[in-house]
Amino acid sequence: MADAHDTRPGALSGIRVLDFTRYQQGPMATVFLSDLGAEVVKVEEPGGEPGRAIGRGKDGFSAYFEAHNRGKKSVTLDLRQEPARQAVRRLVREYQGTGFDVVVENFRPGVMERWGLGYDDLKAEKPDIILASGSSWGRLGPWGSRPGYDHVGQALSGVMVEQGGGPEAVPHALIGGFADQIGAMLLAYGVSSALVARERQGVGQHVDVSLIGAMTALQAMPITRFLRTGQQIGFEERRAATYTHYEASDGRYVAIAANTQAFWERLCDALERPDLKADERFAGPFGRAEHKDALVTALEEHFRTRPAAEWCERLTAADVPNAPVLDYAGVAEHPQFWENGYLQEIETPNLGRMRVPGPPVRLSETPSRIQGGGPELGQHTEEVLLASGFTWDEVAALRESGATRAV
């Protein structure tokens, strides 16, 4: 269980991240960095980044924004104005006396360069800066400058055809934001790797991660198979009779993963079906694959004879990998998520106590922790400018010019 009173520094404590990202891929990457201890300062346009408005309720709560921006500070800067861009360069150099370590952005490739904030520009301000860019298509190639989001990234990556069942079936998208989330993980992984390289080799660099690159990595096995054999099999509801899920008598589902001979035999024992174990068709893995349909029919009929909870108890007692198929209500009640800190409760100044997903990575000596809820728009603008050497007069001048306006 996560310990809210554990004050040991995180793995990235002392690392400062200037975050220009919007929507999901980039913002989630910087959430991961925040959970690891980094200080993340989010730069938002007047009116706030578009994610603030997605699904926003009357109480101001947006699950979309909170999930992808917790633990950050918020600064408003209108980057279309040169004074704001000059302020960014100063932040990069001088924030807290040493400047920022990492800048993260997910604008369309070329936008940061047009603003004079590309990698070469930032490197001129701080030679060891790390710039991390998230995009849809990657920065090179004929599609590099196109706009894109999660859904079209999934489309080009081949995953919709794979999930739909193969080239002859109807394409089917994964859960919304899936490519964004995988892209976020890899973007955070790239930043962490670049920080290690800077520590050991003294170099900053440009980190480049895209949605289609992330989805290619996610599909490493089926794409590798296709590149060798030319076959795209596609998703099968029951690729194996013993590595799937079945409906129980109460309408709930039980998932099993009896993918070894020992687990197969234990499965038969748990089901009290010695006849299946003795059946020559199902004696070995090749036979079970060849006669999959017959075995599926037998297991479907048998699982419908008892409720799901009873099957799970029997399978667990026999040491067969299994789990109930949960909806989110079931996830929220299951102790395994809370004991490992994958779900946590936090206190926020504006939305009260909230239950939220916790850090997915546990580190024994440098614990990950949620650093707070999502910030109010522009909440930390003056604080961050003053910490970068701006005087009150300079802060006031920026405000009067409209460069730091929140709306």
Image (cartoon, rainbow, N blue to C red):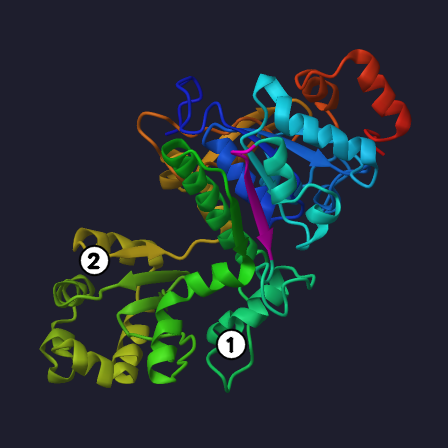
Q: Which image quadrant: the C terminus?
A: top right
In the image, 67 versus 73, the foreground residue is: 73
> Where residue 115 sits: x, y (%)?
75, 44
Q: Main structural element of the magenta stretch: helix, strand or loop?
A: strand
> Where residue 336 sits: x, y (%)?
36, 40
Question: Which one is in front in this view, the residue at disc 2 or the one at disc 1?
Answer: 1
Residue 320 badge: 2
Look at label 1 and name its amino acid: Val
Residue 220 shown in magenta = no
Is residue 111 shown to the viewer in this render? yes
**What's drawn in magenta, residue-wise?**
127-135
Vertical placement of residue 168 versus 278, above or below? below
Q: Quadrant of residue 100?
A: top right
Vertical placement of residue 108 versus 158, above or below? above
At x 44% / y 29%, what residue is drawn?
12
Is residue 251 shown to the viewer in this render? no
At x 38% / y 66%, what residue is drawn?
220
Q: Which image quadrant: the N terminus?
A: top left
In the image, 274 versus 26, the foreground residue is: 26
Look at label 2 and name its amino acid: Val
Residue 133 shown in magenta = yes
Vertical placement of residue 259 versus 127, above or below? below
> Where residue 210 sits: x, y (%)?
55, 57
Check disc 1 and report the residue beneath it: 161
SS at mark 2? Answer: loop
Q: Earlier in the sequence, mark 2 or mark 1?
A: 1
